[in-house]
Amino acid sequence: MATKYGINATKRAVTQPPERPEQGQVKADVLFAYDKYTLSSDLAAADVIKMMKLPEGARIIDAILVCDDLDASGGTLDVGWESNGSDAADADGMFANVDVTSASVTRMSAAVVPGVFQKFAAETQISITVDGDTDATSGDIELGVWFVID
């Protein structure tokens, strides 16, 4: 049987002299960013809703998407980020094909997506892309993102 070490355990216990893990990985303050979009007309496929920006060094911990009933059938949303000059864009890095045919609350941590623990090298625009158009002309889309700064 062999003993294995994670990256930060290696820095602390194996590397000589010991190194400290990045501040965002030990005793970091968890920050929260929130934004809300209120529909005034229906959304068409490929529409983009720009939400909050996350600062340089932000590492996503989790996110929550809350939507009103926005469509009778087929309406879906993707949530991700735009390119920031250092990190590539990923339009569905946080949520992919979220069904908005009824009111819903969706947690990013409940799915396998690349956005879990994603770290951004520069300030990054978070955006929502409409996959399947909606027919509602009113309603809200709310997005909250928990993150730390590394």
Image (cartoon, grey):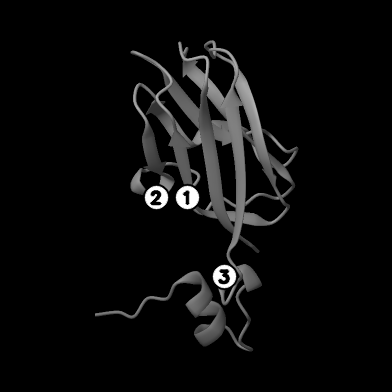
Given residues 20 and 95, the one toward you in this image is: 95
Q: Are marks 1 and 2 in contact (CB under 8 Å)?
A: yes
Given residues 89 and 100, the one toward you in this image is: 100
In the picture shown, does residue 58 fall above or below 140?
below
Q: Secondary structure at mark 3?
A: helix
**Disc 2 versus disc 3: nearer the observer:** 2
Q: Secondary structure at mark 1?
A: loop
* Residue that protrudes farthest toward the left in the picture: 1
Identify which residue is drawn at 74% across, 47% down. Answer: 122
Identify which residue is drawn at 73% across, 53% down. Answer: 56
Determine which residue is flagged by label 3: 25
Identify which residue is drawn at 54% across, 41% down. Answer: 143
Quarter of the figure with residue 27:
bottom right
- Three-letter amino acid code of the residue under disc 1: Val
Count of labels shown?
3
- For the N terminus, the image quarter is bottom left
In the picture shown, does residue 130 fall above or below 17?
above
Identify which residue is drawn at 74% across, 46% down. Answer: 123
- Three-letter amino acid code of the residue under disc 3: Gln
Residue 79 locus on image (x, y percent): 52, 33
Badge 2: residue crowd in 10 Å (few <14, some 14–19, many ≥20) = some
- Three-letter amino acid code of the residue under disc 2: Ser
Rounded to the nearest whole Å, what is the CA distance between mark 1 and mark 2? 7 Å
Residue 100 locus on image (x, y percent): 39, 25
**Disc 1 versus disc 2: nearer the observer:** 2
Sequence-wise, the earlier of marks 2 and 3 is 3
Which mark is on residue 109? 2
Badge 3: residue crowd in 10 Å (few <14, some 14–19, many ≥20) = some
Determine which residue is flagged by label 1: 116
Q: Are marks 2 and 3 in contact (CB under 8 Å)?
A: no
